[in-house]
Amino acid sequence: MKKILLPTDFSANSWEATLYALKLFKDKECAFYIMHSLEPLVSAPSTAVSSKRANEAIIKSRLNESKLELKKELEKIHELPKNDKHRFETVIAHDYFLEAVKTSVKKLDIDIVVVGTKGASGIKEMTIGSNTANLINKQTCPIIAVPQDALSNDMSEIGFATDLSISNYGHELDLLKEIATSSKSKIAAVHVINKKGDLTTELLAKLQALEATLKPLEMDFYLITDVSVEVGTRVFSESRKLGMLCIINKKRSFFEKLFSKSNSKSISSHLNVPLIIFNHESFK
């Protein structure tokens, strides 16, 4: 049974991420943990809590409100068509978002985190919410980041952005293979280099390793040259109208460049495709 964590801030985007997860894993036995992080109070001088009693009252009020909102989330889920393969639990974590996710993943033995890319406090100019971006750079288990309006995506093709740096994938891409198989998706792998030229013998060997790992899935390969990796990947994703884009993230490098403000301005305001992100450390 898959254990899937669904962090929520009770925003519309968080709810869409939940619906997306239920749809994506509709044929799988899953335990979904709907988690809300109740972050510690931070008091500014002008709003400082004047007494321990007042502080306790605020904490209790926030906790009750969170419990009520989680109950509403469950009620909305139970209003959906029933899926006997799915069960649900709610979790309140008394910590900051990143630590709350980290602790929950470890404590609950979570396999996948599915999160919306922009919560209630999202800034329109940013490509991805800061909480989600930080989570992707910190967490080791696979993450699926879901943008707004992703439920209707055509899943006939899943993109795979690769720098062809991995020789042995082991079973780390099993999740991608499961999703592609259940969605009847073809894999479109893309390698972008910022100069003209062909693949070296070493890179060709690593491409063959990727093809072997993904078998029996059908995979097409695209080589884009003479453009930056970030721009090439974004243009590829948008032009092909991918159902998802898979990224193996190297901390604080490719991902941050791909979703930086400067690149979003030069290409588009955002990349409206769900991302499945694996941590590069898992392949070592």
Image (cartoon, grey):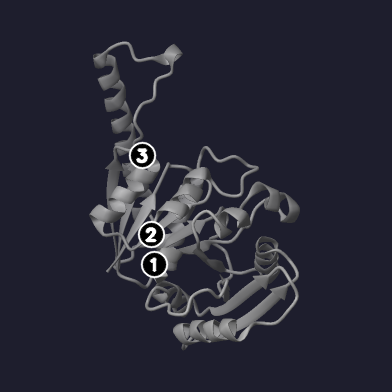
Label 3 residue SS: helix
Badge 2 marks a residue whose secondary structure is: loop
Q: Which kind of residue does numbered mark 1 sit on?
A: Ser
**Amino acid type shown at disc 3:** Glu
Against 180, residue 102 (above or below) is: above
Image x and y of residue 117, in percent = 52, 51
The numbered mark, 2 or 3, whose residue comes first in the sequence reads 3
Amino acid type of disc 2?
Thr
The image position of residue 153, as x and y in percent, is: 58, 65
Q: Nearer the viewer, mark 1 or mark 3?
A: 1
For the residues marked 1 and 3, what is the alpha-carbon distance in whole angstroms?
35 Å
Residue 66 seen in render: yes
Q: Is residue 266 left or right of residue 33?
A: right
- In three-dimensional space, the C-alpha distance between marks 2 and 3, rounded to whole angstroms, equals 28 Å
Asked if 157 appears above or below 103 in the picture, the reply is below
- Secondary structure type for disc 1: helix
Disc 2: which residue: 140
Contact between labelled residues 1 and 2, with CB atoms less than 8 Å apart: yes
Q: Nearer the viewer, residue 52 or 183?
A: 52
The residue lying toward the viewer, choosing from 220 and 69, is 220
* First in sequence: mark 1 vs mark 3: 3
